[in-house]
Amino acid sequence: YDNYDPRKRVWYETAKKNNKLTFTDVYFSKGRKAITCTIPIYNGEKFIGVAGIEMGTDFLDKIIVRSSLQTDVINFVINKDGKIMLSSQKSGIFAENSEKDLRESDEKELSEIAKRMTTDINGVGSIKIGEEEYFLSYRTLETTNWSLGRLLIKAEVLSPVNTVQSLILTQMEELASSVGKIFWIMIGISIIIVLILIFRAMKYGKKLSYEFVKPIQELTAGVHEIASENFNKKLDIKTGDEIENLAVCFNEMTSKLNEYMTNLKQATAEKERSLAELEIAKNIQQSMLPREFDFSHANFEIFASMNAAKEVGGDFYDFYLVDERHLIITVADVSGKGVPAALFMVIAKTMLKNFAQMMIGNDDLGSLVTFTNQKLCEGNDEMMFVTLFAGILDLETGKFTYVNAGHNPPLVYRKSVGKFEYLLTEKRNQVLGLMDDAEYEQEILNLSAEDILFVYTDGVTEAFDEKSEEYGEERLIECLNSLRAEKISVQEIIKSVNSSVKAFVGGATQSDDITMLAIKNKNFS
């Protein structure tokens, strides 16, 4: 076209600015909805242009609509500005092509969730729109700047719980009916016995006959009450014969039925309470890990993540500035899983940070780890232990002092070499928590500008697929070296490794916690 300069187009400028694969928002082109995918092109390290391809969104619309065939499910996609790009709805608050920013919605709960959706956060929230309550699940779409949301009516989601409750009540009614039938059979047997006794007693006179009939009447009345689910009913018959024995059997049976019902209610309540407590423990554990990665310091870039195999886990990471010049990082893996491992993790993390804050000088990391080990050994009757990689980074010189206590070897990216390599330590320190007389030796690593340190736990390399094959150290280093590490952030590095591990594991269950931390040296040399 005349006067058409593609270098001034939004798709060109965005790809050049982001320096990575980029998708535009949805727009109209030639009477149809479309998006453009762009990627910067380099000759060596020199930027020479942008390649882009425009494609219609028909296939995305079909996916959104096909997965929303149920009338009580709404799928939609929003961009970073909170505007709906694609939707299964043609009208209403979630209709596509709406220019309204969901973050400014009059529905306060929807506005709060929309803000989280536009900040690369995944999760599930409960919202109320009008008079209807919904569950809204949302997840960031990698590569694009979009977030996918699915809205379900809360009552429909909880319907399986109501179904289970109804099933239990139905089963109890069937049980009561079966017990009632047994009672009636026993009544029939009792009546036969009574008739025989009455026939034999007739010759002993009316008085003797009355003494036999009265307890039978009491027994019959008691059976009727028990059949109507009054399990607290007790028969008080003192005849000294078979009828009294029968009444005793009835009383024992009602006691056991009553005990069964009580235990069933207690077990159900206990299970619900345990699940709630584990969820609280998970939230507490997650809140103890640093989640703010934007430091005002220009000399480094850091990011970390921890995915527990169970509700709570034993892995943890930590990082903090002890002064304006020195940054401490820690990645550790506690033996075992579940609540015991989580408790030991809290103890180890708290001790390390507290002792580090009291540390005199910034070069004696070995003594800090040695003292922490002594304290962990005290009262450790369960013989739990923790593998540890801890280090102190001098933000002015790039000097990195570290201690590896039985932990996996980290990987170091040297910009001068252009690839990741395993950091093999010469000091073989043992794990923490087993021997209180152990001495821990430190080592030194000098990081140049744009060098990267990647630390992880064995949950990464020991992840198993459905064929019980390990992910392994070779796949890890191949994954890292397939990235243009100097061109992307440490957050993108960790996300790429997470995606690689998940793709490898497939449908297999995650067997161990997965924790990673990456730090990039920025300015010093």
Image: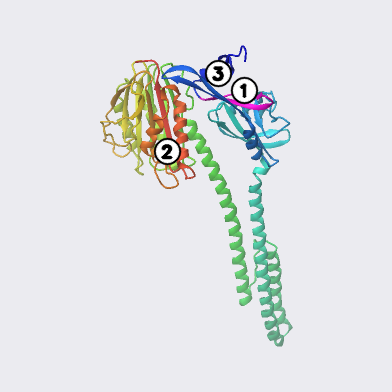
Label 1 – label 2 distance at C-alpha:
38 Å
Is residue 251 positioned above or below 515 on the image? Answer: below
Q: Earlier in the sequence, mark 1 or mark 3?
A: 3
Q: Which mark is residue 277?
A: none
Residue in the image at 71% along x and 73% along y = 217
How far apart in space, not on screen, are marks 3 and 2 (Cα)?
46 Å
Residue 151 in which image quadrant: top right
**In the displayed structure image, the side of residue 217 where residue 344 appears, left or right:** left
Q: Which residue is mark 3?
A: 12
Residue 95 screen position, x and y as percent:
70, 30
Determine the image quadrant of residue 325.
top left
Q: Which residue is mark 1?
A: 81
SS label for mark 3? helix
Residue 314 numbered tag = 2
Q: Secondary structure at mark 1?
A: loop
Q: Nearer the viewer, mark 1 or mark 3?
A: 3
Residue nearest the viewer, comparing 56 with 176: 56
Residue type at mark 3? Tyr
SS at circle 2? loop
Whether 366 is among the magenta residues is no
**Which class describes the residues within 10 Å of circle 2: few (<14), some (14-19), or many (20+)?**
many
Per the rendered image, the range of residues in magenta is 21-36
Please tell me which residue lies in front, 355 or 418: 418
Residue 100 place in picture, x, y as percent? 69, 23
Whether label 1 touches label 3, CB < 8 Å: no
